[in-house]
Amino acid sequence: MFTGIIEALGKVEDIKKENTNVHFTLSCPFTKELKIDQSLAHNGTCLTVINIDGNKYTVTAIEETLKRTNLSELKIGDNVNLERCTLMGGRLDGHIVQGHVDTVGVCKEIIKNNGSTEFVFTYDYDEVTVPKGSITVNGVSLTVVQSSKGLFSVHIIPYTIQHTNFKDFRVGSKVNLEFDIIGKYVNRILQQQ
């Protein structure tokens, strides 16, 4: 389990294909604290550390993960939002995040406000957002502002932009979306009635 509070930015150092799998090697400030078999969220996608070499570590994404996320778009040098799993008994600063990406959304508009930036995203998926509800965008726990079918927006403070890969977003950027787990269960129950 994660909380959607990004710990650090990782940098993609190497990408290797093996059959339908892709091995991503990254560097990050806390690589020396990682261990093999540890879960680590990459742009909100839970991946397992399979190798550590100095200040670099490697994770593997299978075909299903690559189809459902924006990880297949990563290039060497890209910034990746990183979060280690939550420690039991710790604070839940964001919201309950599973690290299971539901779909990829697209940045439709970026609006500079006085003190914040509004990002508008579109998506083609059955889940819904609600105003003031939670959404995870590239692993970042955020509060929904606008909400309509297939579209939502969030407002980002300068600190979050500087410390996440939101600073790299442009109109057309693809982002990983994980909808609120409670909302997903409620939506599923209502669909079955």
Image (cartoon, rainbow, N blue to C red):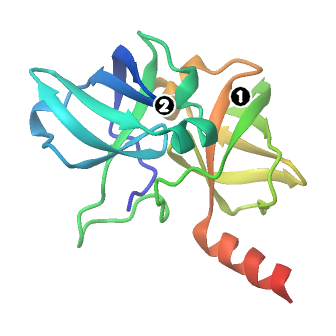
Residue 148 locus on image (x, y percent): 90, 54
Q: Secondary structure at mark 1?
A: loop
- The foreground one among 2 and 66 is 66
Can I make out residue 17 in this image? yes
Q: CA distance from mark 2 to mark 1?
A: 45 Å
**Residue identifier under label 2:** 20
Q: Quadrant of the C terminus?
A: bottom right
Q: Which residue ends up furthest to the right in the rendered image?
A: 149
Vertical relation: 13 (above or below) 51: above
Vertical relation: 167 (above or below) 88: above
- Please give the name of the residue rendered at 14% of the width and 30% of the height, measured from the top-left corner: 52
- Please give the name of the residue rendered at 35% of the width and 44% of the height, measured from the top-left corner: 83
**Residue identifier under label 1:** 114
- Specify the amino acid type for callout 2: Thr
- The foreground one among 160 and 166 is 166
Q: Looking at the image, tell me whether mark 2 or mark 1 is earlier in sequence order.
A: 2
Q: Answer left or right for 82 relative to 100.
A: left
